[in-house]
Structures are given as C-alpha cells and as structure tokens.
Image (tube, helix red, strand yellow):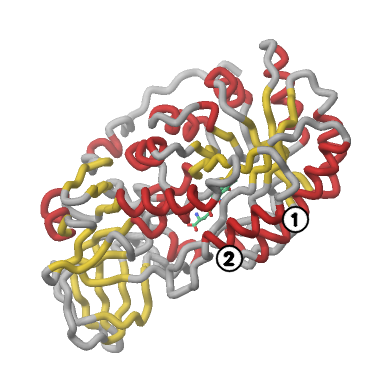
C-alpha cells in the first residue's frame, strides 16, 4: 500500500487526508498517489537502463490524462487499443513515435487517423488487418511499421478471463502461421514488418510464463532476421502482476534479468506494455458507508460505491483489500461489503473481517489504480466517480463528478425520427 498510510489515526494518500478529500469532493472517488506511479515507473525503467528499451504504458489500465501526462513526463510511450486511446496519449504529451496501436478490430478510420498522427507501429492481430493497413498506407504513399502479435500458446497461469496467449484465444496470430504471415507482409507495399510482439495475459505473478513465451518469440525473431526481414524491435507486452491479496509480487529485477538473458543475442529495441504494474497499487476507491444493516445471519456494510464504479469483483471475482479510513484497533468480525446496484453481484467482499463501523464512516478499497475508474459505467443512472491525483500535501481533481443531468441531457422522451432511405 505504498503511497497510503495512517497519519494521526486517519488514512492519507501521501500527506493528504482521505477524509479531507471526501469532504471536498464527495464519494465515491478514486484517489491516486502520483509519487507511487512515478517511483514504480522509475523502477521499471531503471531495470532496463542498460538496454535500448521503450516502455509503452498500457493506456487502458488508467486512461486519465493526468496519469498519462505524469508518465509521459517520465519518458513513457503508450500502448493504445483504440484511436481514442491514441488521441488521449497524444493529448497528454506522449510523442506519436512512442505510441503502439494494438487491438483485434482496428477500423479503416482508426488506421487512417493513426497514420495521420504518425504513430510508431501497429501491432497487427490478423492477416486481413495487415492487408487493410497496407492498402490504406499505400494509397497515401506511406509505409506503416508493424509488429505481428504472436500467440505463443503459453498458459499464463492467470484468471481465464484475462489470459490472451493460449491457442484458441482471439488475440494475435498463431506461432505456426507466423513465418508465412511475415513472408506475406514482405510482399505488401504499405507494410514494413519491423517488430515481433506478444502479450500473453494480465496479472501474471511468476516469471516462468513470460520466459516460455519470450523464448519462442526471440527464436522467431532470429529466424525472421536470418530470412532478411527488417526486425529491429521485440515487444514483450504487458502482464506483470501486482499483489492484491498477499501474492508475492514479481520482482522486477528478476523479470528484467530474464528478459535481458533471453534477448541477449538481439541488438535492437526492447518494448514493454505494462499497465496494471505501473498504476494498480497507486490508487484507492474512497467510499462512504450509507447504511450498516444487521440481517438475521449477517451484517452488511452498504456503500455508496457500486459495481458500476469498480467492476473487478463482480467480473473476475477479484479480491480487493478494504480498510477503514478511521484507524481503529477494534476486533474485526465478518461482514458483507456491498454496493447500491440492483444486481446480486454488486458485492465487494463476502464474510470479510472488518472492524465495527457506523453509517457515514469512510472505507478505502485498495489496489484500485488499474482497470477500475477506466472500467466504470453509469449503470443505474449513476454519475461516474470523481478522480483525484495527490502530489505530496496537495491534490488535484483530475476528473470532476459530472452532474446527473449530463447523463441524459442528450436523450429525449420524444425523439426526432428521420427516414432511413431504404
Ligand atoms: C496488448 C496488451 N498490452 C498490454 C496490456 C496491459 O496489461 P497489464 O495491465 O496486465 O500490464 C494489455 C492488457 O492485458 C494488452 O491487451
Ligand atoms: N480488466 C482486467 C484486465 C484485462 C487487461 C486488458 N487486456 C482486470 O481488471 O484485471
């Protein structure tokens, strides 16, 4: 929980009291520690300081412009999965020549706009996509740099819903098809196949699956180079996990040692796409207990935050640590911590030992810096949560809470119809 600690009996983000934030902007609110994001990025970058390396932060993990800007100022590039994410990265100050564009369904419009922006490379996930990129680039007299994302058929040992590098997953091109796809790429006028790429899944907690996949990718890169392909970059993807529930985190030094050893014979650029690792443990979701309800067999803490604000427990049965903002040494007892949404899965924790708390007390849901605000929705016509960035003893509202009117001001109970024309 670096970046968050109790000071004078009250939980703080760096030197800012979460109680003061709740009073200033209300709840539910995401709070991020800028210092933690920066320090984590620097650790990652430092581990590869002796190699030509480009760290492309996976924008999807937390796409707030303030977070992107902070990382851009550290020198990070961006891994984007939509033209919207590409534009966010550019708006935050990321150089287009540090942006990779991944994703299985890039539209023609997205490809055109990315070419106009001048991104570094497209990470291509299928043969028809490769041909589409070539046709669009060639029509403009351009040559697009691409990596083919390889599916190395490795079990990442993570949750089934977030594994991506096993045969049968929709992502990437199967390893046994790779050489023929590169051979085809070499014949296309709008393509320069300058890289190989992989991304085998998320929240991976051991180095072994990365090593198995990277070993296959490097062997492929060497064969491709021997065949005359201009491979100058290896994109190792993201996926490095974080502790949510006492997991031993991947030691970034051990991960870097493995990557450098496996790629020792490759003189080009190493690329990485970390998302969760950089921001996951740098954020909390701050929420207030609306009601404490005592049922006949259990006690509920009913929060003002719901699954629309933080969907990971409902979607992946994810475990998030939840702590009281008011420090207390009182004996914990099991409670169910639930939200207001009309779904049985709107529950953050079941039978979780918690200290006795009362209506109005604040809770912090930890490890909520990644895939949390970014996946929030306004289901049940609820405003999206606010977001705050803390730096030392100061905080900034980096996403104001919108008014409820904003949620439906562009809808009408009596819409104007137009003739379809068919
Ligand atoms: C292609 C790609 N790169 C990078 C990431 C970032 O993953 P993580 O947040 O686990 O580092 C993802 C998401 O899993 C992804 O799909
Ligand atoms: N959204 C997922 C991770 C998916 C990563 C995107 N490929 C999570 O919260 O764990």
Find the distance from the CA under tag 1 to the CA under tag 2. 23 Å
Residue 177 percent location from the top left of the image: 84, 44
- Please state if 260 lies on the left or on the right of 32 as rendered: right
Can you give x and y, in whole percent of width and height, for residue 240 in the image? 54, 58
In the image, which disc is placed on residue 126? Answer: none
The answer to whether mark 2 is within 8 Å of ligand 2 is: yes
Q: Mark 1: give few (<14), some (14-19) or many (20+) Cα within 10 Å.
A: some
Across and down, in percent, residue 250 comes to: 53, 65
Pointer 2: residues within 10 angstroms few (<14), some, or many (20+)?
some
Q: Element type at marker 1? A: helix
Tag 1 and tag 2, C-beta contact below 8 Å = no
Q: Quadrant of the C terminus?
A: top right
Q: Secondary structure at mark 2?
A: loop
Residue 408 location, quadrant: top left
What residue sits right under mark 1 in the picture? 215
Does residue 404 appear in this view?
A: no
Q: Nearer the viewer, residue 210 or 133?
A: 210
Image position of 354 with respect to 3: above or below: below
Quarter location, residue 109: top right
Residue at x 45% of width, y 68% of height: 243
Residue 144 as seen in the image, left or right of residue 252: right
Q: Specify the label residue 159 is tagged with.
A: 2
Quarter of the rendering occupied by the N terminus: bottom left
Q: Looking at the image, which residue is at 71% across and 40% down?
A: 267
Residue 104 point in image, percent of width and height: 65, 40
Residue 220 shows in this picture: yes
The numbered mark, 1 or 2, whose residue comes first in the sequence reads 2
**Where 72 sits versus 32, above or below?**
above
User: Image check: 183 left or right of 321?
Assistant: right
Q: Residue furthest front?
A: 50
Q: Residue at x 66, y 66 (%)?
A: 208
């Amino acid at each position: 929980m670096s970046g968050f600690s109790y000071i004078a009996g009250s939980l703080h983000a760096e030197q800012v009291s979460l109680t003061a934030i709740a009073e200033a902007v209300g709840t539910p609110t995401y709070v991020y520690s800028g210092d933690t994001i920066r320090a984590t990025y620097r650790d990652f970058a430092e581990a590869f300081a002796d190699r030509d390396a480009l760290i492309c932060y996976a924008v999807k993990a937390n796409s707030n412009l303030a977070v992107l800007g902070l990382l851009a100022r550290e020198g990070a590039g961006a891994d984007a999965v939509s033209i919207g994410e590409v534009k966010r990265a550019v708006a935050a100050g990321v150089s287009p020549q540090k942006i990779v564009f991944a994703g299985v369904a890039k539209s023609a419009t997205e490809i055109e706009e990315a070419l106009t922006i001048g991104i570094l490379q497209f990470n291509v996930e299928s043969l028809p996509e490769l041909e589409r990129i070539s046709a669009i680039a060639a029509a403009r007299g351009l040559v697009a740099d691409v990596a083919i994302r390889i599916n190395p058929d490795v079990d990442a040992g993570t949750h089934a819903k977030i594994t991506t590098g096993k045969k049968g997953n929709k992502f990437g091109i199967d390893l046994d098809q790779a050489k023929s796809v590169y051979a085809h790429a070499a014949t296309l006028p709008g393509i320069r196949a300058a890289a190989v790429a992989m991304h085998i899944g998320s929240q991976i907690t051991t180095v072994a699956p990365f090593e198995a996949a990277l070993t296959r990718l490097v062997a492929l890169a060497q064969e491709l180079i021997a065949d005359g392909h201009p491979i100058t970059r290896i994109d190792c993807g993201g996926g490095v996990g974080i502790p949510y529930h006492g997991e031993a985190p991947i030691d970034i030094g051990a991960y870097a040692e493995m990557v450098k050893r496996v790629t020792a014979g490759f003189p080009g650029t190493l690329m990485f796409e970390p998302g969760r690792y950089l921001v996951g443990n740098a954020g909390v979701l701050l929420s207030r207990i609306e009601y404490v309800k005592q049922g006949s067999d259990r006690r509920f803490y009913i929060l003002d935050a719901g699954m629309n604000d933080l969907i990971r427990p409902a979607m992946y049965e994810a475990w998030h640590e939840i702590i009281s903002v008011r420090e207390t040494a009182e004996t914990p007892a099991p409670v169910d911590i639930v939200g207001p949404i009309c779904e049985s899965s709107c529950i953050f924790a079941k039978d979780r030992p918690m200290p006795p708390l009362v209506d109005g007390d604040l809770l912090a849901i930890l490890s909520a810096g990644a895939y949390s605000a970014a996946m929030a929705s306004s289901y049940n016509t609820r405003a999206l949560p606010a977001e705050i960035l803390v730096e030392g003893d100061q905080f900034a509202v980096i996403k104001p809470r919108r008014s409820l009117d904003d949620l439906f001001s562009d809808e009408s109970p009596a819409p104007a119809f137009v003739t379809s024309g068919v």
